Amino acid sequence: MQYETVIGLEVHAQLLTHTKIFCSCSAGFGGEANIHTCQVCLGFPGVLPVLNKEVVNFAIQASLATNCKINRVSEFARKNYFYPDLPKGYQISQYELPISEHGYLDIDLSSGNRKRIGITRIHMEEDAGKSIHDISPDGTLVDFNRTGVPLIEIVSEPDLRSSEEVIAYLKKLRDILIYLGICDGNMEEGSFRCDVNISLRPLGQKEFGTRAELKNMNSFRFVQKAIDFEIIRQQNTLQGGGEIVQETRLFNVSKGITESMRGKEEAHDYRYFPDPDLLPLIVDEEWIKEEKGKLPELPDAKKERFMTDYGLSEYDASVLIADRAVAEYFEQTLKNFDNAKTVSNWITGELMRYLNEENTDIGGCSVTPENLAAMLGLIKKDTISGKIAKKVFEEMFKTGKEPALIVKEKGLEQVQDLSVVEGYVDKVLAENPESVAEYKNGKKKLLGFFVGRVMKESKGKANPAAVNEIIRKKLKQF
């Protein structure tokens, strides 16, 4: 029997507010255990939560960017469960009345097709603390710094059918949140994480199969591996006459398999009820309009504009817009050098190569857009060759110096005197009589050999166009 995979996602995004959702404690990552805590986030008797308005602002922006309908009235609820890292014995979340509903994202697949994935809802909630199992041999320790850190949970419709679609959706969603500046998207630190609900059903059947939930995966690669393994596991179970158990499973990275963690809870297990300490949240049109005005140009729109306005290929535009800071760097460079393709090639080539080698991002780059444009201007004016430019760029990246200064200090200016270039050519041809003879006998590809030798002889400073022209003329004379 053939089966269809059905996948829905619950994505938790930690918001980049300075303070927690219901108190003034720092929401920053790290720090000594249990220092970012107070009576409110630890659930002491008699304390009252106060909603952080910036959390609502960010939730509205995320809702607008994902085409969701923002509810004019939403309500906070208590989600009751008992873990050591949940000090109140409940989590303040939203249930029946979330901040927004009924949105969508369009994802692009390797087949060239575009698919729309529905978003069921976005709701705000507080994070739990962190249980630490590998420090004390006597038991589990708890760090409550993360308790009360603001999250939005973005719940998709069960519209996904493969690990490829899941990764495309997650990357698209992560890019949008980073563009908005409301989440840093760091999966390793847990500020962008997802739970995957996955089930199989016979091809053509409308009813969903029994689902398993996959949790605690901190990279796109592990998400994909876990889904692919789980699909095969469920297929083998069903084809062998077994039944799928509704449960929560973890991905064992070292073994590359999913393993049972616990039975899967349903909504009624959490005994949701409206939080009596928090009034219903009213979001009017003016508030929505204000947050809409803060939205930046989002990735899809920027990609389309780069292709239309700058004539870039879809691939080049996709690479540049993948990071908002890189896209801004590209456009800043274009203010001083007007060839978009050339700028794109240098950013996606040399610049990104050095950034990757140094394990840094564009924010840590010492080559300013103005200096990159100035270097490209030197190439255009034949002050330096493209080959020499790579040496200049390397020095710019190391030191942050202006390209003209590097060229002057290192004597890298291109040789413009044609008599000097001719001298290099004569020397190379005289040293390679056999190759000259082979060229005259029809082996025209040797022209590249001669050009390479002349460029080496001139230490890359000869004008390549002049070198080509002089070599051709000289060879005709033999």
Image (cartoon, rainbow, N blue to C red):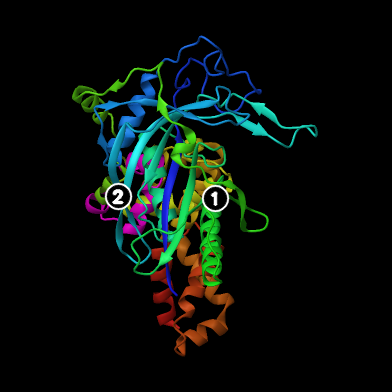
Q: Residue furthest right?
A: 137
Classed neighbour count for the residue bearing mark 1: other residues with Cα under 10 Å, few (<14), some (14–19), many (≥20)? some
- The secondary structure type at the circle numbered 1 is strand
Numbered label attached to residue 303: 2
How many numbered discs, if any?
A: 2
Residue 339 seen anywhere in this rendered image of the structure: yes
Labelled pair 1, 2 in contact (Cβ < 8 Å): no
188 falls in the magenta region = no
- The secondary structure type at the circle numbered 2 is helix
Is 45 above or below relative to 379? above
Q: Residue at x 47, y 74 (%)?
A: 448
Secondary structure that dominates the magenta span: helix
Q: Is residue 253 left or right of residue 66?
A: right
> Which contiguous range is marked in magenta?
306-335
Q: Residue at x 33, y 44 (%)?
A: 120
Residue 416 seen anywhere in this rendered image of the structure: no
334 falls in the magenta region = yes
Say which quadrant the N terminus sits in.
bottom left
Marks 1/2: CA distance? 40 Å
Classed neighbour count for the residue bearing mark 2: other residues with Cα under 10 Å, few (<14), some (14–19), many (≥20)? many
- Front residue of 439/237: it is 237
Q: Residue furthest left?
A: 285
Q: Which residue is mark 1?
A: 247
Q: Position of residue 208 (x, y in %)?
A: 39, 58
Type of the residue with mark 2:
Lys
Say which quadrant the C terminus sits in.
bottom left
